[in-house]
Image (spheres, rainbow, N blue to C red):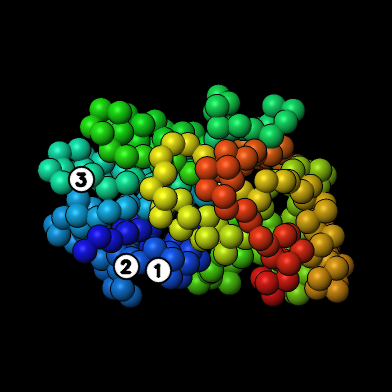
Amino acid sequence: MSSIVITGARGRIAESICTNLEQECGELIRVSRTSGDGCLSHEDAFDGDVFREASVILHAAWSSVPATSESHPGIEWRNDLPFLVRILDSLKDCSKNKPLFVLLSSAGTVYGNAPGRASLEKDETRPIGWYGRGKVAAETLCNYYSEAFGIPLLILRISNPYGLSSHSNRPQGLISSALQSAKSGNPLKVWGDGSARKDFLHCSDLGHALSTAINSRMTGVFNVGYGSSHQVRDVLKIVEQIVGKNLNLDFTLAPHWDVTDSRVCCDSFFAATGWRPSIELEKGVSMCL
């Protein structure tokens, strides 16, 4: 039976999209570093030829976020890229039809700052932080294996996802951090003056986008986002309006690696799939309460 394997299954993105994938794509095999809670360990997956026998591999495993990547330069080369190479190595001599390999990359970091317009897939990648450099390295590896060994490849550059599940009281991302600060009254640290622009995509929309792409077995490189960006200050106003409380804002110098103008054009993905996001920012923030 064909199956979809998802790596990084205990991660916040994977946990937030698994329901969509199961409902819209079929059987899902979860893979994580250690076994348990419905997950196979990496070693279990390799020993059982799980990757080689899959119809689709959705590679969501990644050990860092931008801040940890900056505090531990090269962590992706030690942790993430060797695992990626090991999976790709296992696929290169498949005697059966090779599975579609789907890499979740980062539209918010691989381009660097937008060139006066929304970034296009054909634009040169110019990451300004280690996280983005790691994602570009992952894309380069996948492209090599795809071209050299005929592995069908889909690279999806995802904009800033929000509404993600979390097992921690520590919020991650602007929207979840702002909501917690609004509720608690604790200060919210804001990088820069609030003029930075980001494209925010609700995790439910992300799940539907991934299901659509997987079911069509499309290949290539595509931006996946809402298709329009918001300034940080406007996002914070939306949070205040929805929660009904003013935020205690602590403006601080933005780190040098923060992308301040993250605009991505998603027209190619919209045209190829017919999919469109349905959750505008105000509704999405309300859904996070």
Calculate the distance from the C-alpha at mark 1 to the C-alpha at mark 2: 6 Å
Residue 49, picture quadrant: bottom left
For this view, does 111 lie left or right of residue 218?
right
Q: Are marks 1 and 3 in contact (CB under 8 Å)?
A: no
**Camera-nearest label, 1 or 3:** 3
Which residue does the image show at 62% across and 53% down from the upper left? 276
The kind of residue on which mark 3 rests is Asn
Earlier residue among tags 2 and 3: 2
Which residue does the image show at 43% across and 66% down from the upper left? 24
SS assignment at label 1: helix
Which residue does the image show at 32% across and 59% down from the upper left? 4
Residue tagged 1: 22
Please tell me how crowded label 1 is: few (under 14), some (14-19), or many (20+) other residues with Cα within 10 Å.
some
**Residue 284 x, y percent position in the rendering:** 69, 65
Image quarter hosting the C terminus: bottom right
Residue 216 or residue 110, whichever sits in front:
216
Q: Specify the farthest residue to the top.
A: 124
The kind of residue on which mark 2 rests is Glu
SS assignment at label 3: loop
Residue tagged 2: 27
Residue tagged 3: 97
Q: Are marks 1 and 2 in contact (CB under 8 Å)?
A: yes
Residue 110 vertical position relative to residue 215 in the rendered view, above or below: above
